[in-house]
């Protein structure tokens, strides 16, 4: 091995240095080999050309310190396989990542060790990894000896190919849609996951958005039922406070950490699951667990009725909002009010709806400074609650999403958000004192608010600005606005739902009540078409512009009642 001894600042992951009764594993001193350390020292000397994208079965001959980077073209998830022949003893590494960093594969970019190491005696082998991995770029590196690698493949591990379709006259939207579908498929196996790479975990909040896509693309709620049922089946959740739900499950939480906000998002999703699945039995079975969750939160209600000093990991989104979560976090309370309303509707408990309205009124009185909603208030040593000047973009979106504010009650703020916020604000620096939102989840909430306002043209334009660079770089959609974390995150597939609803115009499908609402919008497209599955058969809509007309064809399964709204500014002509 050629090792650069000048490389002193070695990255050591918690899985290497924090082994304990809570984090299981083998201590560093007991390990016979540590690829993460060796990989940082190793300086390969020679390479062959980068495949773009990789295809074919040509053999790759590698001597000691040689490597070859293969490009799959887009992010994929599955089991890595290859045929390897060694004339003498060899060590072969597969290193992988979703992007290239300085024209190379950074195996530690996701704060995990993306290395599969083989120690091979002379002979021929057919290798396949025992775990699935996610990557676009695969680096074949011969650490010692020499070998020949051929028939490299990825055995895909994802949701089955979906029948739903979408095609528009703007090819950029088609690329974004395809990336959304890939993102969904790789994050919707037996349950909804946040990402198929680093964590592969059933995180709440992510699932609120992914679940909408599932019914659009698959036409049913089978995966969501698996996901929801997991929070029902255990008699209790060890290591968590009584009443609290785990932030992701199945998972071990023996460190006692939980996200109280994510338990609230579970209730928000449950109301939508009830409407799209008709699985009232599961929803009713979860009633005691939901009400017990509210009992947990009652312990943290202050004299104003707001949640204060919530414990553990209080999380709003990946932005500056994460720094303003104590003592009274207003976005968390906005979420609390929204979820109380949801549970009140779902379980016919008007007292919860009334409580939510009282909380909203207190938030408006405390948090709104006349221009924007403030993120938090801090309790002084004297016991007085003082509202800060910390203000974030995502806090404004929480306020509107959970009905603390509406375009009618706060028209000036809504106008600012609509016209001066969005994907270009980093360049325009408008209201630079308001901290920027991130993809997860502020920008997603923004799209939902624009949808409620019927701003389809703006949704189309902003979706391209927010997502096209992701789709073009990895073929999947990311956790953050930058490639600093997962580049294949399940919640981001929600763009599929947005394109069907706000661009194509299939506004809503009630598969239980057999109703479909169509809404034609003013969008800068010449034509658009799409197909969505239902248990009774597909719904198809296609339209094209012809002068002052929109000529459309619509097919709905027998027994479906169709309503059509025209906001396109053009005359509708059915074919």
Image: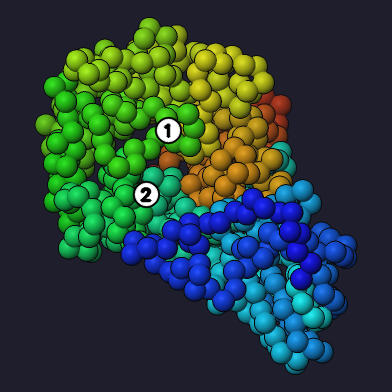
Q: In this view, does 264 lie above or below 34?
A: above
Going 49% across and 32% down the picture, which residue do you hit?
319
Q: Residues within 10 Å of mark 1 (few under 14, many from 20)?
A: some
Instruction: Give the x, y percent position of residue 144.
Output: 77, 77
Viewer-side residue, 485 vs 380 = 380
Element assignment for label 1 = helix
Going 42% across and 30% down the picture, which residue do you hit?
323
Q: Residues within 10 Å of mark 2 (few under 14, many from 20)?
A: many
Distance of label 1 from label 2 (alpha carbons): 17 Å
Element assignment for label 2 = loop
Q: In this view, does 376 lie above or below 45?
A: above
The residue singled out by tag 1 in the image is: 322
Q: Is residue 540 above or below residue 27?
A: above
Viewer-side residue, 426 vs 180 = 426
- Report whether 385 appears left or right of 411: left
Going 19% across and 45% down the picture, which residue do you hit?
293
- Quarter of the image for residue 527 reads top right
Answer with mark 1 or mark 2, whichever residue precedes in sequence: 2
- Report whether 289 appears left or right of 555: left
Q: How many marks?
A: 2
Instruction: Give the x, y percent position of residue 199.
Output: 48, 58
> Which is in the foreground here, disc 1 or disc 2?
1
Asked if the residue at tag 2 contacts the one at tag 1, i.e. Cβ–Cβ closer than 8 Å, the answer is no
The residue singled out by tag 2 in the image is: 204
Going 17% across and 57% down the picture, which residue do you hit?
285
Instruction: Give the x, y percent position of residue 422.
Output: 57, 24
Give the position of the C terminus as an image quadrant: top right
Instruction: Give the x, y percent position of residue 88.
Output: 80, 89
Observer able to see residue 273: no
């Amino acid at each position: 091995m050629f090792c650069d001894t000048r490389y002193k600042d070695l990255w050591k992951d918690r899985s290497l240095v924090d082994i304990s009764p809570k984090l299981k594993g083998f201590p560093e001193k007991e390990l016979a080999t540590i690829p993460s350390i060796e990989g940082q020292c190793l300086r390969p000397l020679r390479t062959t050309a980068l495949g773009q994208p990789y295809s074919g079965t040509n053999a790759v001959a590698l001597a000691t310190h040689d490597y070859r980077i293969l490009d799959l073209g887009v992010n994929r998830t599955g089991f890595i396989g290859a045929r390897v022949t060694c004339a003498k003893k060899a060590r072969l590494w597969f290193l992988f990542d979703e992007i290239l960093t300085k024209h190379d594969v950074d195996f530690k970019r996701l704060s995990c060790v993306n290395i599969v190491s083989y120690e091979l005696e002379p002979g021929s082998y057919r290798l396949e990894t025992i775990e699935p991995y996610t990557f676009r770029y695969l680096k074949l590196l011969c650490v010692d000896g020499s070998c020949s690698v051929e028939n490299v493949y990825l055995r895909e591990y994802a949701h089955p190919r979906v029948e739903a379709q979408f095609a528009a006259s703007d090819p950029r939207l088609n690329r974004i849609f395809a990336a959304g579908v890939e993102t969904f498929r790789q994050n919707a196996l037996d349950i909804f996951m946040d990402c198929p790479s680093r964590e592969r975990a059933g995180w709440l909040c992510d699932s609120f958005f992914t679940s909408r896509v599932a019914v659009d693309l698959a036409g049913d709620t089978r995966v969501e039922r698996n996901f929801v049922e997991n929070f029902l089946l255990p008699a209790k959740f060890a290591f968590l406070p009584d009443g609290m739900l785990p932030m992701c499950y199945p998972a071990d939480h023996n460190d006692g950490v939980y996200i109280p906000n994510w338990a609230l998002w579970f209730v928000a999703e449950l109301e939508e699951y009830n409407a799209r699945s008709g699985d009232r039995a599961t929803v009713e079975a979860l009633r005691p667990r939901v009400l017990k969750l509210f009992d947990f939160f009652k312990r943290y209600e202050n004299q104003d009725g707001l949640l204060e000093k919530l414990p553990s990991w209080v999380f709003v989104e990946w932005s500056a909002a994460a720094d303003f979560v104590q003592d009274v976090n207003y976005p968390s309370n906005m979420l609390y009010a929204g979820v109380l309303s949801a549970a009140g509707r779902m379980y016919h408990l008007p007292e919860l709806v009334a409580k939510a309205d009282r909380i909203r009124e207190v938030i408006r009185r405390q948090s709104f400074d006349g221009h924007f909603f403030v993120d938090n208030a801090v309790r002084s040593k004297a016991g007085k609650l003082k509202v800060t000047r910390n203000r974030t973009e995502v806090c404004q979106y929480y306020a509107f999403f959970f009905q603390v504010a509406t375009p009618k009650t706060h028209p000036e703020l809504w106008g600012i958000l609509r016209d001066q916020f969005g994907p270009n604000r980093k360049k325009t620096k408008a209201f630079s004192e308001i901290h920027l939102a991130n993809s997860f989840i502020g920008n997603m909430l923004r799209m939902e608010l624009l949808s409620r306002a019927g701003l389809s043209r703006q949704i189309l334009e902003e979706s391209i600005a927010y997502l096209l660079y992701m789709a073009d770089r990895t073929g999947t959609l990311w956790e953050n606005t930058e490639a600093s974390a997962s580049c294949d995150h399940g919640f981001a597939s929600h763009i599929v739902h947005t394109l069907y609803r706000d661009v194509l115009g299939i506004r809503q499908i009630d598969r239980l009540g057999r109703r479909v609402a169509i809404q034609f919008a003013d969008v800068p497209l010449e034509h658009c078409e799409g197909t969505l599955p239902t248990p009774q058969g597909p719904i198809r809509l296609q339209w094209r512009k012809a002068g002052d007309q929109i000529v459309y064809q619509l097919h709905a399964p027998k027994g479906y009642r169709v309503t059509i709204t025209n906001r396109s500014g053009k005359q509708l002509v059915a074919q």
